[in-house]
Image (cartoon, helix red, strand yellow):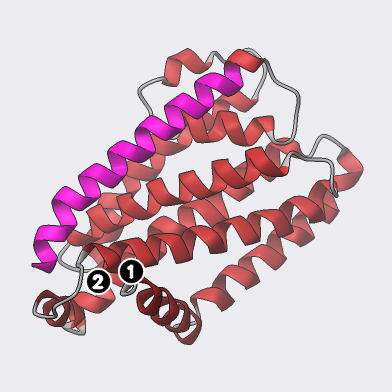
Amino acid sequence: MNTLVPFLRLDSTLLFRNKLFHISAIITIIYIGLFYLLKPLGNTHIPLIVLIYNDPVIMGYMFAGVLWLFDKNQNTIQAISVLPISKSNYIISKVITLSILAVILSFIMALSAVGIRFNPIHLTISVFLSSVMFCCLGFIIGSISSNFLAFLMKSLPVFILFATPVTVLFDGVNPVYFILVPSLGSILVMQSAFVAVEVISIQLGYIHMCFWTAISIFVCYRITIPRLL
């Protein structure tokens, strides 16, 4: 923990200096403008969930991958490998920082779209754990990519696969069809933050999301930590 705090402080500073906070803020402002345009149409929870899933959550994936490649090109990875510190803190601090940022941005978007008419607990947990999963996935793909172009190419099938459960937001689509897709639980719990859904759907969402988040953390450690040693 003593070495994690300096990592958290450093990562927050680097995210600010590298304009990643600014990029997230600009995109969020654009989305807020879209919400105001869509409000007269009513029933804004579907685009809201899609945009929260797309911006704070998936942006964590991109930021994680880019940060890994940036540190690799700047020889930071090599420097960390010889320092007498816990190598896991390098990953943990970035995941925590990006996930907290995702939660903050999601609340701003939710308040702008629906006011206080949402469940903050479901929103916080779904966004935080989803961001953790995507950040770990970003580190995994980034660590096995030689450059940013290779990272983007490998990310395309990931985005397509993880986006398919969004269709459960529409009536008549059975979530069971996407039970093997890691992002299903995130979508179900996020949906429960804005609309009334069956208890079984919420329970399934939490179990599914926690399971795949744990898997992503395990795989991330197995792939990335050896590269820091």
Please, which residue is most extreme toward the right here? Answer: 40
The residue at 24%/60% (across/down) is 142
The residue at 47%/45% (across/down) is 129
Where residue 91 appears, as percent x and y from the top left, is: 29, 63
Chief secondary structure of the magenta portion: helix
- Tell me the crowding category of disc 1: few under 14, some 14 to 19, or many 20 or more residues within 10 angstroms, Cα based: many
The residue at 47%/52% (across/down) is 58
Where residue 183 appears, as percent x and y from the top left, is: 44, 35
| Secondary structure found at label 1 | helix
The residue identified by callout 1 is: 66
- Tell me the crowding category of disc 2: few under 14, some 14 to 19, or many 20 or more residues within 10 angstroms, Cα based: many
**Picture quarter containing residue 68?**
bottom left
The residue at 66%/41% (across/down) is 121
Q: Is residue 84 above or below residue 200?
A: below
- Left or right: 128 as drawn, with respect to 221: right
Q: Is residue 13 magenta?
A: no
Q: Assess whether mark 2 and mark 1 are in contact (beta carbons under 8 angstroms).
A: yes
Question: What are the residue bounds of the magenta stretch?
Answer: 201-229
Identify the mark at residue 69; answer none if there is no mark.
2
